[in-house]
Amino acid sequence: MDHFLYRDGVLCAEDVPVAEIAAAVGTPFYVYSTATLLRHYNLFDEALAGTDHVVCYAMKAASNQAILRTLAQAGAGMDVVSGGEYLRAKAAGVPGEKIVFSGVGKTAEEIRIALTGGIRQFNVESEPEMEVINAVAQDLGVIAPITVRVNPDVDAKTHAKIATGKSENKFGIPIARAPEVYARAASLPGLKVVGIDVHIGSQLTDLEPFRLAYSKVAELTEQLRAQGHDIHRLDLGGGLGIPYARSNEAPPLPLEYGAMIKETLGHLGCEIEIEPGRLIAGNAGLMVSKVIYVKSGEGRDFLILDGAMNDLIRPAMYDAYHDIVPVIEPAPGVEQRPYDIVGPVCETGDTFAKQRAMPPLNPGDLVAFRSAGAYGAVMSSEYNTRPLIPEVLVNGDQFAVIRERPTFDEIINRDTIPEWL
Ligand SMILES: *Cc1c(COP(=O)(O)O)cnc(C)c1O
């Protein structure tokens, strides 16, 4: 559920008409709903009630400072995947002891940043990385808390580009090798083993792959404990999917996910960490764009928008589906017609939807891409020298620009010309 609803025939973000924001900031832009962000965070928090737990928001999904602060004030920890994200989380007010650091290629410099600023744990993804964390920790005279990310060889049944838990993926170490790797970790004086980590992919719409992976983690916990390791924390990653198409069957709810976690792992008495990103931010954001032209082609009509693949790359990159709705509610019974909905970028990949049924639209009309809050603004670029689009946060009847659109001068002046030119 989200807080983007039609009221009196106009699409609103909470209590603010989307068209009002468009008039103030121009199009295209992203708009997020505070109430939706908090609702989704709380769903996870409540799903794990009764179990010692931390919800570490996977901030790569949407990492604006205002979003991070909204969630941090509600009690969220953060899952970061780079030194930059670590510093962003700290800048938003998240204490180091609530930040977990994931990712396959942490550099010595990034590890140093996190160890200096304080860290809940590193999720170690390889043996060479483990050696570097140990070396940096020893150099700083501290002990680095770690889990090892295990790859359970489970098929997450999601898009190939976001599946991470199969043995052919680059993530984690094969679960069968875990005892050997944990033995090595225990021998390194700069490290302290605190638990096990697993993350099998994103946009999972079925609980079974999770259940399979978590059952394997339960077995491994007992095996490692028998070998003398103090496994008291289980990081279960993120990945719970969201409904992108309103008409589709609903993915499992956080409550069902939480119940399954308790069922598969509850007997171990471990502290549970989860790292949801998409489910917290996805349906909490829209991308709003304007129709520039309606163009009639050979047997098809194109809606050419001012938003493009550089602003929202998910359709081009993952063949992702987004509901696209007019900002003025169509009259009941209005006849829909098929459009190809495209952006202005010079690539055929800059197509948001093909033959999508829409009510008749005209130049100047606004449309909103639903479920654009996660992996939207964070993956945008200035391809074609199109400025990064603004981000806006709504809270009740208030809204604020939380990232400005850069001017063309700012964009151009980021380049520097060598003196020989
Ligand atoms: C991307 C990622 C997440 C978040 O995944 P969602 O599908 O957005 O919930 C969590 N943990 C790790 C390690 C990730 O790489």
Image (spheres, helix red, strand yellow):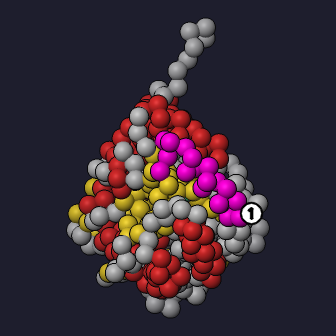
Picture residue at 37% right of the left edge, 63% below the top: 32
Q: Position of residue 281 (x, y in %)?
A: 43, 66
SS class of the residue under badge 1?
Answer: loop
Main SS of the magenta part reads: helix
Residue type pointed to by label 1: Ser
Q: Position of residue 306 (x, y in %)?
A: 53, 55
Residue with the mark numbered 1: 167
Picture residue at 24% right of the left edge, 70% below the top: 396
The relative height of residue 330 versus residue 421 in the rendered view (above or below) is below
Q: Residue furthest bottom?
A: 333
Q: Residue furthest top?
A: 420
Q: Is residue 48 visible?
A: yes
Of residues 338 and 371, which is closer to you in this image? 371
Picture residue at 65% right of the left edge, 47% below the top: 127
The relative height of residue 158 versus residue 78 in the rendered view (above or below) is below
Residue 247's quadrant in the figure?
bottom right
Of residues 77 and 108, which is closer to you in this image? 108
Q: Position of residue 62 (x, y in %)?
A: 45, 57
Of residues 101 and 333, which is closer to you in this image? 101
Q: Residues within 10 Å of mark 1 (few under 14, many from 20)?
A: some
- Tell me if 26 is positioned left or right of 74 in this view: right
Q: Is residue 6 magenta?
A: no
Q: Is residue 174 magenta?
A: yes
Picture residue at 39% right of the left edge, 42% below the top: 87
Task: Magenta stretch: give its range.
Answer: 173-192
- Tell me if 351 is positioned left or right of 372 in this view: right
